[in-house]
Structure formats: structure tokens, C-alpha cells
Amino acid sequence: MIGYNLLCILPIVLTFIVFLFFFSGNYLLDDAGIAYYLESKTHRKPGDIEPISIWTQSIIKGVAGFSAIMTFISFFQTVDFSSLKRVVMPFLCLYLEFFL
């Protein structure tokens, strides 16, 4: 049970606490009306004005995606699936027979 808590529950709680500040900060920046201006360098057209929360949410998406991949890798490296084979193999064979 200690390995499960260390690999699954603790990262979820820490991630929630860290990103809670980002989400509330995004709301406050949107509510204050803070935006950024993207000026096109190649074309002569008006620039694009977007809320700054879109930029910060793209950073959060990247960090969340990378951390999810790293969590899956660490989870599958540490969990012992040898006892699961005796339970899953009969059901897997029945499942494959259904489609063949």
C-alpha cells in the first residue's frame, strides 16, 4: 500500500495544490482584463489580441501531459504484474475467441 500511495495519491495531491494557484491566477488575470498582443512580422495585418490565460493554460497543458507520461512510466516500472497473469489470461482467451 505504501508504493501505491507514493506513486499515485501523493503526486495527485501535490499537482492539485500547485495548479490550483495557476487556475485562480488565470481567473484573476482574465477578470482584470490583462491581454497580450501578437504582432505579425511577415504580413501587414492587424495583430492578434488574446487573454493571457490562454498562454498560461498552454504551459499547464504541456506540463500536465509530460507529467502524465512520466507517471505512467514510473507506475509500470514499479508494479508487479506477475500475479495478474493468472487472473487475466483466461478472460483474455475467452475475449479473443469471441472475435476469432
Image: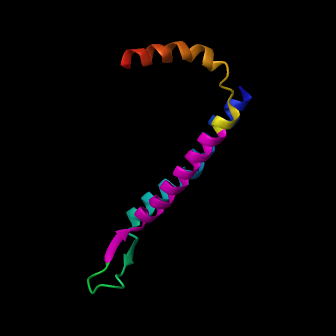
Figure check: 15 above or below 6:
below
Figure check: 13 above or below 51:
above
* Residue positioned most to the left: 45
Percent position (x, y) of residue 9? 63, 35
Percent position (x, y) of residue 49? 33, 74
* Quadrant the C terminus occupies: top left
Figure check: 14 above or below 40:
above
**Residue occupying image coordinates x 65% and y 25%:** 81
* Residue positioned most to the bottom: 44
> Looking at the image, which is closer to me, 56 or 98?
98
> Looking at the image, which is closer to me, 58 or 30?
58
* Quadrant the N terminus occupies: top right
Magenta residues: mostly which secondary structure?
helix
Magenta region, residue range: 48-74
> Looking at the image, which is closer to me, 61 or 36?
61
Task: Residue 49: tell me if it is visible.
Answer: yes
Figure check: 44 above or below 48:
below
